Amino acid sequence: MSPWYALLIALVAVERLAELVVARRNARWSLARGGVVSGRGHYPFMVVLHTGLLAGCLLEAGLAGRPFVPALGWPMLGLVVAAQGLRWWCVTSLGRQWNTQVIVVPGLPRVRRGPYRVAWLPHPNYVAVAVEGAALPLVHDAWVTALAFTLLNVPLMIVRIRAENAALAALGEAAPRHGEVARDTR
């Protein structure tokens, strides 16, 4: 495994820690304003899956001796960088309403700026998660990790999106219909 790949995984881990700092700050802000937390049951699985992604990248690339294949690795690195850009565009667009948990503050308007103004893409942050989860392992040809993350992430995202839509509906906001924009909390 290339030392720079281990550095890339470490940088993504630092980014995840930065997300948690922002999420905790935003959770305190939301809860102080009557925010309602929903869908707690899936959250531990999400943490394990995302931690497993990083560990799997290192373990598979190192133990299985996966090589860096430039024709695959460089485009995948580009996708990882693009996914990070999209993720932080989501975080900044949602502002204090962004969180790693599903927290909805009653009375706040639906976010319709940044990537949330694109009607055909109601959950842009989950696109970033899916792209990164497939691309990050493939930077160093860790295809088993990419496949495992993708297969485990699909049902998790279904549960997560249902939890968000139910939380919005419980507060009087209809679940997004085709062409509408939803708040994406992850």
Image (tube, grey):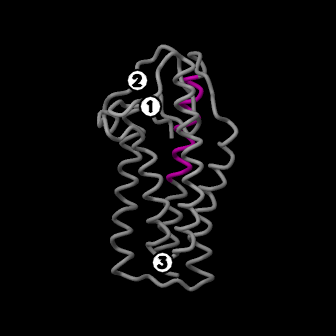
Check disc 3 and report the residue beneath it. 141
Q: Quadrant of residue 60?
A: bottom right
Residue 64 image position (x, y, % from top left): 60, 84
Does 40 appear in magenta?
A: no
Residue 116 image position (x, y, % from top left): 34, 35
SS at badge 2:
loop
Check disc 1 and report the residue beneath it. 183
Q: Quadrant of residue 135?
A: bottom left
SS at badge 3:
loop
Q: Earlier in the sequence, mark 2 or mark 3?
A: 2
Most common SS among magenta residues? helix
Does 19 appear in magenta?
A: yes
Above/below status of 179 relative to 108: below
Q: Residue at x 54, y 32 (%)?
A: 164
Q: Residue at x 48, y 34 (%)?
A: 98
Q: In the rendered structure, which amino acid carries the disc numbered 2? A: Arg
Depth order, front residue of 131/65: 131
Q: Earlier in the sequence, mark 1 or mark 2?
A: 2
Q: Quadrant of residue 43?
A: top right
Q: Quick check: 79 left or right of 29?
A: left
Q: CA distance from mark 2 to mark 3?
A: 40 Å
Q: Mark 1 near mark 2, Cβ–Cβ under 8 Å?
A: yes
SS at badge 1:
loop
Q: Residue at x 56, y 49 (%)?
A: 17
Residue 175 image position (x, y, % from top left): 47, 27
Instruction: Report crowding for label 2: few under 14, some 14 to 19, many 20 or more residues within 10 A (C-alpha).
Output: some
Q: CA distance from mark 1 to mark 2?
A: 6 Å
Residue 55 image position (x, y, % from top left): 62, 66
Check disc 2 and report the residue beneath it. 110
Q: In the rendered structure, which amino acid carries the disc numbered 3? A: Asp
Which stretch appears magenta? 15-30
Instruction: Report crowding for label 1: few under 14, some 14 to 19, many 20 or more residues within 10 A (C-alpha).
Output: many
